[in-house]
Image (spheres, rainbow, N blue to C red):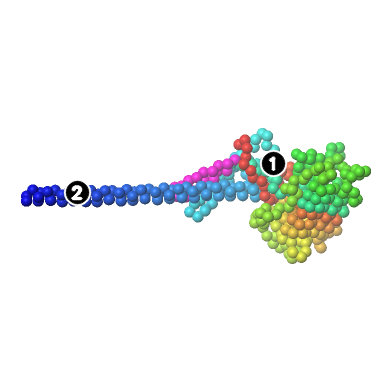
Amino acid sequence: MRRAARARRRVAGFALLGVMLAGGLACLVAATVVVVAVSVSRIVAADERLDAATAAAEAGMLAACDFLTWGGSRSLMPGEHHELALEYGTAESAVTLTGLVPLASDPTWLRRVRVEAVGYCGRGRAVLAHSLVVRPQELPCGLSIGGDAACAATVIVEGCGVYCGGDLHGRKHITFQAVEPSSASPAPDYAHGERWPAAGVHAAGCIYAAGVEVHSAGAEAPATDGDNCTGESVPEAWVSPPRGAGLAALRAHAIPAGDALTANVLDLSKLSPELPSPLVVAVAPEDQPLRIVGWRSPPPAVPALTVVVVGDATVDAHPAAEEGEGVCLAGQLVVTGTLVVRTSTLVEGSLTAGALSVRATLVVRLDEHWHSAPPPGPLTVVRGENT
């Protein structure tokens, strides 16, 4: 009896010990699971903060490119800094742009910029750094026509060529003028001189004078001209007005024309000399072209200006203008539709149109150093090389 009782007590003791060990093991496992769960949650949170910081750094880099694209590099000299502070929800980005010393082989108009974008989110931190090159080649330059051009009046071009995406009629009315009239050298092309050193007419279609194709048998074509008959090719980007996303970006960065735009008339003389942004976009009425009038003095009297007309436009004499005053704009005139020149017009810079009809004297002058002071508007930003 006593032995049986002692045996029962041993079994009960072992059972109790087993229960205690099982309970302790369960507590240990539970504690381990809690620790692992907390660690995993911290890792996930850390990863999320790092992802948010990386996204903020990338957004900061895009903001820097946008700043440079829309003229920020013009005032950023070598050694100078510009800072941007941006917020993206719970994350933020600190961006530093530094002007770099150009390479010895760089043209004088090219800008090099070092951009560092640091994204923060809590303890998460991400850094992006790139060397960028900014060049003024976003909008077509010189006298550029996306489609056909018809010249029935004098066209004087200085410092560039005529670039046409279609046919050009009235070649006999076009004169290329050298900066120094006494120079025996051909008039230079400062817009696309790397391809055409001497200014001429370059058409993707054909060039006509008095109804005759200038390269046909018996006709005398200027040596500087080229068209479809000679195998000439004109890149679309060099002649086409902006459209789609490019046009939307222009409209987003432009300022209202204010009192200068009334009904279907844009009066250049009423545009303030101290505009907060030298970029104006005007939309032509659906049922008629926008009339462009007025004389805006060239620099240094007032800053250069880029005017973009969405739709068709005509250049007309101002009702109150003195006889022979005409229309003047320094910078760039862009018309996405057809432009008709009905009064004497001077463009100190570049003119781009979807199609062109010249019925009064048109003068386009592109300065040799236009790259150093390009017309207001978008520039091209690319990743730099050799930096």
Disc 1 marks a residue whose amino acid type is Trp
Label 2, label 1: how far apart the Cα atoms are: 87 Å
The quadrant of the image that shows the C terminus is: top right
- Disc 2 or 1, which lies upstream in sequence? 2
Residue at 30% over, 51% down: 30
Residue sitting nearer the eye, 318 or 256: 256
Find out whether residue 53 is within the magenta segment.
no
Residue type of the residue flagged with mark 2: Leu
Q: Which mark is residue 237?
A: none
- Image coordinates of residue 259 in percent, x first then y, are 71, 63
* 125 is within the stretch colored magenta: yes
Q: x, y percentage for residue 85? A: 54, 50
- In the rendered image, which residue does mark 1 sit on? 109
Tag 2 residue: 17
The front one of 133 and 336 is: 336
Q: Are marks 2 and 1 in contact (CB under 8 Å)?
A: no
Q: Which of 274 and 347 lies nearest the eye of the viewer?
A: 347
Whether residue 150 can be seen here: yes
- Give the magenta-colored segment's residue range: 115-131
Asked whether the viewer can see residue 302, the reply is no
In the image, what residue occupies the spot 81% across and 54% down?
Answer: 356
State the count of labels. Answer: 2
As helix, strand or loop, the secondary structure at mark 2 comes to helix
